[in-house]
Amino acid sequence: MGVVASAPAKVILFGEHFVVYGEPAIVLAIDTRAYAKIENRDDERLCLHSSNLNLSAYFEDGTFKVEQGNTREARMKFEPIRLAAERVLEMYGKHVGLNIEINSTVPVAAGLGSSAAVVAAVTAAAATLLSVKISKQDIFQITFEAEKIVHGTPSGIDPAISTFGGALLFQMDTGFKPLDVKMDIPLVIGDTGVERLTRVQVEKVRQVREKYPQVVEPMMFAAREIVLRAIDAIKKNDMNTLGDLMNINHALLYGLGVSDESLEWLINAARKAGAFGAKLTGAGGGGCMIALANDERLEQVLEAMKRAGGRTFTARKTDEGVRIEGA
Ligand code: MEV
């Protein structure tokens, strides 16, 4: 008998990159989820399998053995999961073997927080299987710790949204505040398929900021204003303003050098097909973009983005953070 848990992916609606310098960001959990199934084993092995990535490996007595897929990739993807499972085993008080099966359709390394969603799901499933009492705050902490292996010094946005769900306003100095979003925010997500490293994109922005401080400072101010106006637009259910703000936010990100041709294709296609607005989401340089459209135009925006070469899907906000699906 196993336990299945799931956790949502996320989109940054406004404020990526600027958030690194203390400005606010708005993040939504979306209804695309990563699933983890965990079962007991008779031995002490920690066996991991990801059907989507075609990776299998196990950890035992300090050794790591890959059974399917590339060793480097398997280590990169599985190390955070191992850390999370071991934290739960520490709470359980004894080492036992586990089979961990990952099933996620969240695009990987694309700015949607796939690794945090997987780790949060694994943590919840392992705790439930072993009857370890765990709070959402514990799941967040464990996921955050595991994320540091992947991203170095992440802001914590991904672990928080995957754990708690809903919408969050995040700022470095004040942390997370839940945002009450009643507005339906129908999004089309376009994955360029271009994998990139968050670290590299963050470094690009740092260099531009260092070279042109007087130019970038007002952009930071504009990004803050965008977030404040977006909160207001969300309260008023104002799609037009929200779309405009997405376009302006994207222009700022473009100015910082974190868009690329693959993103521009999809963004232009979405706007031409009638989206209220479109922007890159996450670190940029490839990865994903989002377009805001009402229900009548959602399909045509999606089709246009697909024709422009994107892997596309629709997404809506979900209030459901990490959850147990069943045993
Ligand atoms: C990446 O998803 C978002 C960035 O703002 C980096 C971060 O917040 O850690 C680019």
Image (cartoon, rainbow, N blue to C red):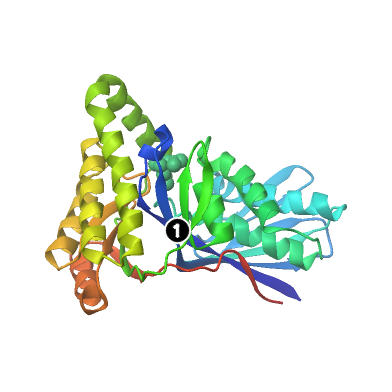
The residue at the far top in this view is: 211
Percent from the top left, x then y, of residue 51? 54, 66
Taking 75 as reference, is 311 left or right? Answer: left
Image quadrant assignment for residue 207: top left
Q: Residues within 10 Å of mark 1 (few under 14, many from 20)?
A: many
The residue nearer to you, when weighing 202 against 250, is 250
Q: Give the image quadrant in which the ligand numbered 1 is located.
A: top left
Left or right relative to 288: residue 88 = right
Say if disc 1 is inside 8 Å of ligand 1.
Answer: no
Considering every residue shown, the one lying at the far right of the view is 94
Q: Is residue 38 visible?
A: yes
Task: Name which residue lies at 61% across and 57% down.
Answer: 120
Image height of 313 relative to 59, above or below: below
Name the one closer to the observer, 142 or 94: 142
Label 1, on which residue? 10
Residue 214 rendering spot, x and y as whole percentages: 24, 22
Q: Could you tell me residue 32's position as x and y percent? A: 46, 68
**Position of the C terminus by quadrant:** bottom right
Which x, y percent locates residue 188?
Answer: 30, 66
The front one of 111 and 139 is: 139
- The answer to whether residue 115 is visible is no
Quadrant containing the N terminus is: bottom right
Residue type, mark 1 in image: Lys
Answer left or right for 206 relative to 55.
left
Q: Which of the 4 quarters of the picture holds residue 259?
A: top left
| Secondary structure at numbered mark 1 | strand
Which residue is drawn at the image coordinates 19% and 74% (left, top)?
300
Q: Residue at x 79, y 61 (%)?
A: 133
